[in-house]
Each structure stands twice: as C-alpha cells, then as structure tokens.
Image: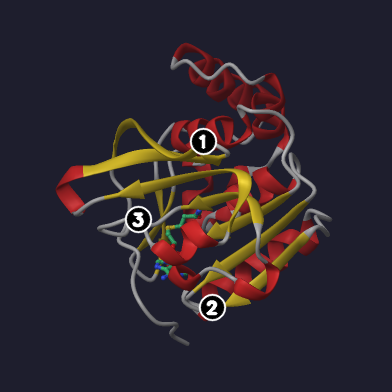
Amino acid sequence: MTSLRTRDRLINRLREEGIRNEAVLDVMRNTPRHLFVDEALAHRAYEDTALPIGYNQTLSQPYIVARMTEALLANGPVKRVLEVGTGSGYQTAILAQLVDQVFSVERILPLQEQARERMVLLGLRNVKMKHADGGLGWPEKAPFDAIMVTAAPRELPEELLSQLADPGRMVIPVGPDEHQELVLVTKNKEGIKREALEAVRFVPLLGGATS
Ligand code: SAH
C-alpha cells in the first residue's frame, strides 16, 4: 500500500490534474507521505486526499501541495522560503528538497515537534523551525524569496507582504471558510500583483501560539 506502484499512481493522477513541473513530481514520488500521518491512516497516504493529523488540523491534499509548490517555483529557482503552518511537515519536506533553505513556523507545539523528528528521519537539514504565530512571519530571517502559507487568513497579512523580497512570490489561501481562494502574490519593480488561482478549503490561520 506504500509501494512504488501506489506512489506512481498518485503521480500520474497529479499529471492528469495539470501538474507539469517534473522536479515537483519527482520529489513527491520520492517522499514517503505515509510517514507524515498516523499509522492507522498510512494505507490512505497515497490517495489524492487531505488527511487528519490531530489537533483539528489536516495534511493538505497532494494535488494542492503540488499546485502551491509549482506556483511558488514557476519563475525559476528559489533560495529562502518562509512556510507558515508546518503541520505534519509534509509540505516542508517537499519544499526542502526544491529550495536552498526553509523557515517554517507552527503555532501548535506538539505538531512542530513531530514535524522536526520527521525532518531528522529524512535527513533534511536545511529546515529551521519556530514555534510562534506565523501570521507575524519571521522578521529576524526576512526577507524571503518566497512565502507559502498553508492556513487561511481572511485578508492578506501585511506583515507577510512586508517580509517578501523584491522580486518575490507568495502563495496563500485567503478568505472565510466557505469562500477561500488560493492567491498568488508577486512583488517586483512594477509593484504588487494579486492573482486568484482556484477555490480551496484550508483550516483557518489562527492568532497566537499554543502549547
Ligand atoms: N502544510 C501542512 C498543513 C497543516 S494544516 C501539512 O502539510 O501538514 C495548517 C497548519 O497551520 C496547522 O498545523 C495549524 O496549526 C497551522 N497554523 C494555523 N494558524 C497558524 C499561525 N497563525 N501560525 C502558525 N501556524 C498556524
């Protein structure tokens, strides 16, 4: 159930859904998603579906992970990435294999601790984690060439926008529970551009950090 054939089936499906970046597809084929969920759910890890990770949070659907990663990388190689909402660490692990350095912020401490163990297990050493309210970004490490947010605020957080480098790209779900849109924000000499990619459903971006 976690065999290469099962994983290949998922990759084929991502292709059918329109994912074209071969580097992203390759990394997703080679990253063991079953290690990011509870053992009882491991048999569903290569379905194209979101899965619960406890604390009322979810590991995003593979298609969404691929789509967001592809959008972030669409303008060429990226060096420093801020990720808000580490969760299971699956998206973190995908990013870590495609960019130079990932800075990932999570507000629920036990989730962050598990994610940290998974990075060690997979030998991913270019990830730095912080337990904090990621809506405030990580000012000491800014600016970031790219920012990926995996929980939805109602409005685009100004703090994050200000920590985005020029040029820079941010992928973020925005809106209330029932009407979220995945938004691509690009910053460059001409200014800041906002482009809606598709309708999505993420958990809300909450304020404050919790143990
Ligand atoms: N990318 C994750 C998705 C996890 S769900 C994965 O693939 O597993 C969204 C995550 O965002 C949750 O872990 C939630 O705790 C976290 N989150 C929500 N609001 C946050 C905030 N303000 N700061 C940091 N993390 C936040």
- 52 w.r.t. 29: above or below: below
- 124 w.r.t. 19: above or below: below
- 13 w.r.t. 107: above or below: above
Q: Which residue is mark 3?
A: 156
Q: Earlier in the sequence, mark 1 or mark 2?
A: 2
- What kind of residue is marked 1? Glu
Residue 20's x, y, as percent? Answer: 58, 16
Q: Is residue 115 left or right of residue 137?
A: right
Disc 3 to disc 1: CB gap under 8 Å: no
Q: Tell me the SS state at disc 3.
A: loop
**Labels 1, 2: front one:** 1
Q: Tell me the SS state at disc 2.
A: helix
Q: Is residue 130 left or right of residue 71?
A: right
**Labels 2, 3: front one:** 3
How far is disc 2 from disc 3 in space, using C-alphas? 27 Å
Q: Which mark is residue 3?
A: none
Q: Is residue 102 left or right of residue 108?
A: right
Q: Tell me the SS state at disc 1.
A: loop
Q: Which mark is residue 110?
A: 2
Q: Which quadrant does ligand 1 occupy?
A: bottom left
- What kind of residue is marked 2? Pro
Q: How is the image coloured?
A: secondary structure
Q: Earlier in the sequence, mark 2 or mark 3?
A: 2
Q: Residue at x 53, y 20 (%)?
A: 19
**Is disc 1's CB within 8 Å of ligand 1?**
no
Residue 150's x, y, as percent? Answer: 44, 53
Disc 1 to disc 2: CB gap under 8 Å: no
Q: Which residue is mark 1?
A: 190
Disc 2 to disc 3: CB gap under 8 Å: no
Q: Earlier in the sequence, mark 3 or mark 1?
A: 3
